Amino acid sequence: MHIALVVLVIASFATSARAEFEFIVDPTQIPAGVDLMQVSASAYLTDIQLQNPHTIVCNSILPGPQSPNIRFIIAADDIYSIAMIHVLRLSFPCAGEMVTYTRTFNPYTQFYLLGPANPPAAVTDFQIDTQQFCAGPRTGTWLTDSLDAGGAFPDGWVEEGARVSSWQAIQEDGTDWALRCQHLGAEGPGSRLLLSPIFDLSWARQVAVGFTHQYAHDQSTAEFLMSVDGGSNWQTLDSWSVSVNDYPLYDIRTLADGQDSVRFGFRFEAFAGSATASWELDDLILNAVSAPPVADQPVPVQPPEISPLNQATIGCRFRYQVPIQGNLIQYRVDWDVDGTYTGPDEDWTGMASVPDSTEVQILRELIQVPNGLVHFEFRAKVPGGEWGYSGDLQQEGIEDDWTLWIQGDTTPPEYSDFLPVNQPDPAWVENRTQTVGVRITDDGSILSSTLAMRVDQDGNGLFEGAEDWTPLNGYSSGHQIDVTEELVFDRDGEFRVQFRAADLLGNSSESPELLLRADTQAPPVSVLHATARMADSLAVEFTSCPDLTFLAYELQISTDSEFDAADLVWSTPEDPALAFATTATTIVTGLVPAQEYWARLRAVDALGHAGQWSNTVSPTMNTNPPAAISDLRATLAPGGIQLDWSAPIADSEGLVPVWIDSYSVYGGTDPNFTPGEATLLGNTPTPGFLLSGAGDDPGIGFFRVTVDGIGLGTLPEGLLAVPEGEFTMGPDPFGHGAATVVTLSDIIWMDETEVTNADYVEALQWAWDNGLVQADS
């Protein structure tokens, strides 16, 4: 067993380079007729001598402090070998000076001393690890060297009082001195107070104090006092009013442990008429187990403030009288915030690169600290000593540990309260200038400098080219930011907008894509064709009218060529298929047989826009065929002969528009061949025909194309025909786009008031959507 005890002794020993051993027994426990001088100690101890009636001193012939453990065994040859030992004391050289280790026992402890009357197993060891003792905090044997043959008063001790003789150093035996105070008969009543030096016991625990004394009462009192504030306030540990000669030992751990200003007082008070009262003190000892290193100056300061960051610095300072082992400093953290250190990463972890020192400042950076009250603990030790722990009570365990209070931000910004509302299916708006908005919130603080937005300006559903992230200005950082921005679009359509933000800790996120819808245009004009008239019904075909918010087709029926509000409207209640822009036919029923009817058609959208009326048709209005093909062209092409022509835009009488169902292509060997079933090469719904494998019949060298359709007789009201062909358009009045070559493959109809590039763009968008337009870029 290694014992680290620090001892202060009022005693005088013959200083020697060898270790000196002393034990004190209770003389009342020695059987009658037994002489302590009979005690011997084989080869371990020499120079055994009786110092006083109850103290034996001897020298040791053992290795010095370089040995890891010096062990002394006391042996007795007498058959009465059971002694009641009160104090065991060892003096040995340490770092060039003699130091003293004392072990006291209270109550008296029985030791079995090896001898003829005892079996070998009953050996009692008195041992000390001298290397540990020399390394640990100590004060050595003070006062011993300050007492000399001249009887000088010990350094650091003072006395107060009057009318009682001063405390004097008296010689007991050789170099053994004691302090005595006495009252002479000629002196009046009075007292003397002997004060010890102030002891710093901040490093010590399990402190005990003891001394030997002889007190002669004779109308006097004696008090043993103690102070923990250097002598400002005192408390009485013991007092005597009868004569006594003993060896009191006091357990003062609850009073003195960890105190830095401990002082002792001995008050001797005598009364008039007292002539033989005295008090003699000797062998003052202080026993203490070295306390572990002391931790203070917690980082962060306790109690901690709330931290918005999930990273922190923890630390403390450890202090001790001798250097603390830096490579043994450890820490642990309650990472899962469950109030224990039982998690997989919560065991003790060493600190790297901490130098040995009597004062060590420890700092440890932590990252990814969870939210909550997070406990942490440090511990440190000196060679051979016990662990010292951080915390309010300096105890191992989480109950008194210091904490971090983390309410950090581990999540990125979140988005809500979108504008337009009802995302992802907002309402269509009859305005190309719209407000987009979002509320951005975060557990921490959103950095306004990170706000950005991107807009799908061309409405193609992609963020590309110049549609990348654009910073937003005019907002302040904070827990919540309400963003509103005004956008202007140069066309109708569906446009996507997205926001981006990051918080103080770098957590970033993007909002969902917000949808904005703009529809400011009426549906386009359709071309109407009456395909059949039965007794009570009328069948019509019409070109589609795609629109962003298409609602329905309306077919108005009149019994004359003048339409008014009273005329029948045939729409979705009568034919639900008219609610779809892709519908191209309907049959009007319930007509009066033999009655002539006129019809026109338009499309309406959900925002209340109504397209212009189509051309007016009647089954009996016009039976003229379309004009003949006048520009038939034949060219050699890979795999055959390519025939091309332009679609007629009028009927045989020059009236427009016409309804074309298809084209029939014929071929013959004679320029005057007659088109017919025998010469039919094929049909096509659009201009252009590839005659594959024409080389198989080299006699076919002449071709004709006929048009299957009918003239409609009247142009849709207020429309102009835009012929097919190639022309250049752009940029628009807003500077969008570049000059672009556009090829129109079919005739389209435009409002005669549409004369700007922007208007052409609108019309061509419809033509593009219907496959009628090609552009080189």
Image: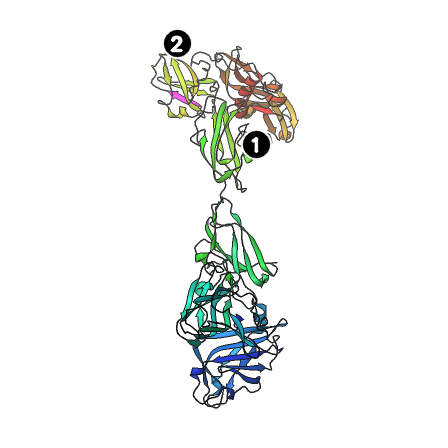
Pick the front one: 118 or 427: 118
State the image quarter where residue 620 is shown: top left
The image shows residue 756 at horizontal and vertical percentages of 57, 15
Q: Is residue 584 magenta?
A: yes
Task: Single out the mark in the foreground, 2 or 1.
Answer: 1
- Dot label at residue 581: none
Q: Is residue 560 magenta?
A: no
Looking at the image, is 249 positioned above or below residue 58?
above
Looking at the image, is 366 positioned above or below residue 598?
below
Provide the residue span drawn in magenta. 582-591
Pick the front one: 650 or 53: 53
The image shows residue 481 at horizontal and vertical percentages of 48, 33
Pick the front one: 404 or 72: 72
Residue type highlighted by circle 1: Pro
For disc 2, the neighbor class at 10 Å (few under 14, some 14 to 19, many from 20) is some
State the image quarter where residue 721 is shown: top right
Looking at the image, is 78 positioned above or below residue 358?
below
Q: Name the residue tied to disc 2.
A: 560
Which is more N-terminal, label 1 or label 2? 1
Q: Label 1 near label 2: C-beta < 8 Å?
A: no
The quadrant of the rendering that contains the C terminus is top right
Q: Secondary structure at mark 1?
A: strand
Residue type highlighted by circle 2: Asp
Pick the front one: 519 or 32: 32
The image shows residue 602 at horizontal and vertical percentages of 44, 18
Q: Name the residue tied to disc 1.
A: 471
Instruction: Farthest residue to the front: give it.
Output: 186
Q: Secondary structure at mark 2?
A: loop
Please say whether residue 68 is visible from this viewpoint: no
Q: CA distance from mark 2 to mark 1?
A: 63 Å
